[in-house]
Amino acid sequence: MRKVLISLIAVLFVAPVLLAGCQSGIARDTYDNVVSQLNNAQNTITQLQEQIDDLEETKEAAEQDLEVAWATIDDLQVQISGMTGQYDLTGDTVLETVTNIIEFYHDTHAYSKPDLFVCSDMASEVWSMLKARGIDARIVVGNIDVAIDDIILSDHAWLLAEIDEGQYLALETTGGYVVYEDENPLYYRGWYFDSPADMKSYNELIKEYNVRVEIANDLIARDNQVVDQYNQSTNSSERAKLEAVHEMLEEIILAHEAELYTIGDIISGLASRCGT
């Protein structure tokens, strides 16, 4: 009887546990699935929170960059405000405007060497700046050191700006200053063009003229050598050949000289004389 009783008690202790599992009504796989979904949801929340944290950091960085940008804008506005007077070239009078323009141009451009073509380009640029403000001007070529009577001998270019009706003021574009007539009257003597286009045509013709002059000079030098050889020769046959070469060179030289006169006339026709 004692052995049987012990077995029954053992059964009674185990049975409630088994019955409790059955009474819950939740299958094991369902429970595991719910737990898995819960874990996934928690992982998703964690990832989203990390993304939110990253976005917050990005937002803070963007706000800092925005503050720097606004500060830069404020600084630039102050600089622009300070430069407005400096680069407002229009003065109270035409003379003041002209002076402002020539000084500003000199401050913002470099002039490397005394070259007719470089200074004529600079004069053309200032001419355009003056025209943009309704100021008439002339591009002038000539020589500011000695008086010349031939436009071909010009070695410099500058401007004459009309500061009043019929009253002109010389502007030295390579130096950035005005020149009054009593300071150097040669600035008021030369040949002027009405537009940069005429000045450009002049430069192209001058270049061609100079090349032809070099060729003509070379031909003349060769012809002189032939003449010297002819004079020193005692051989009649050699003298005859040298004479033929001399006549040929003379013919070529005359053709070049005729072309030079033609180009010179065209150049003179592009410009008008100013001063005496």
Image (cartoon, helix red, strand yellow):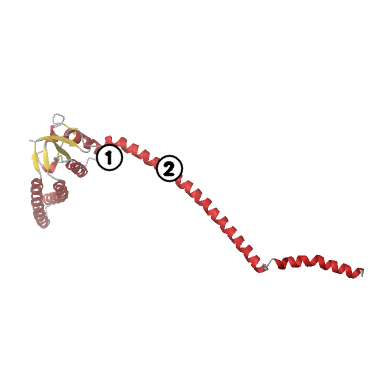
Q: CA distance from mark 2 to mark 1?
A: 34 Å
Say whether residue 127 is left or right of residue 27: left
The disc placed on residue 99 is none
Check the image and report above or below for 146 versus 218.
above
Report whether residue 56 is seen: yes
The residue nearer to you, when weighing 233 against 93, is 93
Quarter-of-image position of residue 33: bottom right
Residue, disc 1: 108
Check the image and report above or below for 237 versus 104.
below
Residue, disc 2: 67
Quarter-of-image position of residue 184: top left
Residue type at numbered disc 2 = Glu
Quarter-of-image position of residue 26: bottom right
Q: Kindly give the residue lying farthest to the right in the view shown.
A: 1
Say whether residue 73 is left or right of residue 222: right
Say whether residue 100 is left or right of residue 260: right
